[in-house]
Image (tube, rainbow, N blue to C red):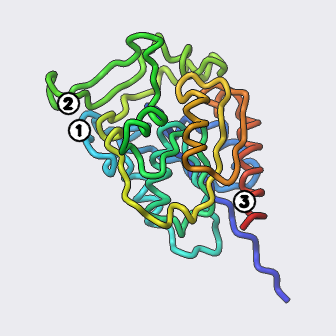
Amino acid sequence: MTKLPSPVLHFVLVHGVGGGGWCWYKIRCLMESSGYKVSCIDLKSAGIDSTDPDSILTFDEYNQPLIDFLSTLPPDNQEEKIILVGHSAGGVSVTHAIHKFGKKIHLAIYVAATMLRLGFWSDQDVKDGIPDLSDYGDVYDLGFGLGPDQPPTSAVTKKEFQRKIIYNMSPLEDSTLASMLLKPVPLLALQGARFTEGHEADEVTRVYIKTMHDRVVKPEQQDAMIKRWPPSDVYTLESDHSPFFSTPFLLFGILVKAVASSSTQL
């Protein structure tokens, strides 16, 4: 009897606020060197996408590159298993995707990420899922695409705060690279992320990777989101908010372990 080939594991990596596909360069290298397929998504206005972030006013528009990518994948694909990985605010993009394409996704992994089942509907959602950096002072440069008397439409962490808050355990060369590449996030669009009830989201196995020295999405926020929408597994990393820089080998190991563990549970 001919044995069918094992499906290819295809990791789709989604960046967080201000980042881009470039954030994952260490993880991509480790994965591709180990034989995995990897796609790194630039969301609208992020990475090499040149869209003005102040012109993006809805979450659907911001997340369209991920949705477009997933929509091109065939349903019931027996040749690939899609592992969707979201970092930080990329977790909101992942949740949106599993609501729309749950049947296409083998596993959803949240890395120091916002994990809210229906997005930002309540004050509790905001408390748990949006970073509170007020302890550090005035940390954001804001854009006002709708006018100075309207709510800000974009935000980026000021360069003088980036290493202290986002990359406090990361190599200096990586935080230097990030300071050159970080871009404003479409703030109004991200804050407007709200999803309606969708049963497919609960059919996708989810895993959470906690970052124990995170100054952005603090450990207590991560715990609160895990408690409200429990994933199948929770892993921990002794890292800052950016484990793809600070602990890439450990993060890679957990990602592979999470996939192996989920496969035995299915």
Mark 3 nearby-residue class (10 Å; few <14, some 14–19, many ≥20): some
- Residue 74 horizontal/vertical position (percent): 51, 72
Residue shown at the point (56%, 22%) measured from the top left: 215
- Residue 87 horizontal/vertical position (percent): 55, 39
Three-letter code for the amino acid on which mark 1 is drawn: Ser
- Residue 127 horizontal/vertical position (percent): 44, 32
User: Sequence-wise, which precedes: disc 1 or disc 2?
Assistant: 1
Element type where label 2 sits in the image = loop
- Residue 145 horizontal/vertical position (percent): 20, 30
Element type where label 1 sits in the image = helix
Do the residues under discs 3 and 1 have CB atoms within 8 angstroms?
no
Q: Which residue is mark 1?
A: 55
State the CA–CA distance, disc 3 to disc 1.
Answer: 39 Å
State the CA–CA distance, disc 1 to disc 2.
Answer: 7 Å
Q: Which residue is mark 2?
A: 145
Residue 253 circle label: none
State the CA–CA distance, disc 3 to disc 2.
Answer: 43 Å
User: Sequence-wise, which precedes: disc 3 or disc 2?
Assistant: 2
Residue shown at the point (25%, 27%) measured from the top left: 152
Element type where label 3 sits in the image = helix
Residue shown at the point (59%, 30%) measured from the top left: 220
Q: Residue 151 lies in what quarter of the image?
A: top left
Do the residues under discs 1 and 2 have CB atoms within 8 angstroms?
yes
Residue furthest to the bottom: 1
* Numbered disc in front, either 3 or 2: 3
Residue shown at the point (40%, 28%) measured from the top left: 183
Three-letter code for the amino acid on which mark 3 is drawn: Ser
Q: Which residue is mark 3?
A: 262
Residue 243 versus residue 137: which sits nearer the camera?
Answer: 137
Q: Residue 251 lies in what quarter of the image?
A: top right
Residue 115 versus residue 48: which sits nearer the camera?
Answer: 115
